[in-house]
Image: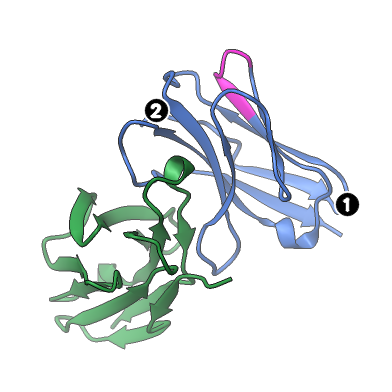
Amino acid sequence: AAGVIQSPRHLIKEKRETATLKCYPIPRHDTVYWYQQGPGQDPQFLISFYEKMQSDKGSIPDRFSAQQFSDYHSELNMSSLELGDSALYFCASSAEGTTQETQYFGPGTRLLVL
Amino acid sequence: DAKTTQPNSMESNEEEPVHLPCNHSTISGTDYIHWYRQLPSQGPEYVIHGLTSNVNNRMASLAIAEDRKSSTLILHRATLRDAAVYYCILRDVNYGQNFVFGPGTRLSVLP
């Protein structure tokens, strides 16, 4: 079965640079979520989109922005990168209307900021 | 979201059943109980969820106390592949799409 696709899988950036992470949800899933997981920490919710509109917002820094496109893929844009942004970034997708909207997670993008 | 409490870690022997407890004494009537697990270097993976009745699927069983203040995830025969961090998460059926991952239980499976 098709799963959530994230690209790139690994990314190395310098401080103050920008990064764009991409997420391709499972076909026919209309909701996308972004989570950040720092070293040794639990995943933290950043932001979510339903039908291309922002649906919920968590602890996402102002330096980060995201959007969902007409084909339902999503991009997380990160600017003025800081050392503390080094983390695993997970995207998850779900289908609105399914029982309690089970979220299916991608393999993650590992971002290292030097 | 209501808070959950889980043991920091547990150990099990391979091919034996594992019972992972979760306390959620402040659960509301509209909170579903979800379990996800995260294997090393992978994204969280859905395991099971339920509201009031016990639930079974191909991965596990979920036993929910009658007062709903606690639940237990049951892996019937642990394998080495089940070694992961297990998260018990409550989410209101009426709102709140994202999951709040709290400290879960790190399960070690011994051969």
Residue at image point 43% right, 69% down:
A27
Residue A78 point in image, percent of width and height: 19, 73
Q: Identify the subunit bearing mark 2.
A: B
Q: Which chain is green?
A: A
Q: Chain of mark 1?
A: B
Q: B68 left or right of A10?
A: right
Identified by mark 2, the residue type is: Ala
> Which quarter of the figure has residue A70?
bottom left
Q: Position of residue A97 (x, y in %)?
A: 39, 45
Q: Quadrant of residue A33?
A: bottom left
Which element carries disc 1, helix, strand or loop? loop
- Residue sitting nearer the eye, B3 or A94: A94
Count of labels in the image: 2
Give amino acid for label 1.
Glu
* Viewer-side residue, B90 vs B30: B30
Which residue lies under the disc numbered 2? B2
Chain rendered blue: B
Q: Nearer the viewer, residue A91 or B41?
A: A91
What residue is shown at x 39% (from left), y 32% (from top)?
Answer: B93
Q: Which residue occupies the extreme top position in the image? A: B67
SS class of the residue under badge 2? loop
On residue B15, the disc is: 1
- Identify the residue at image location x=73%, y=50%: B58
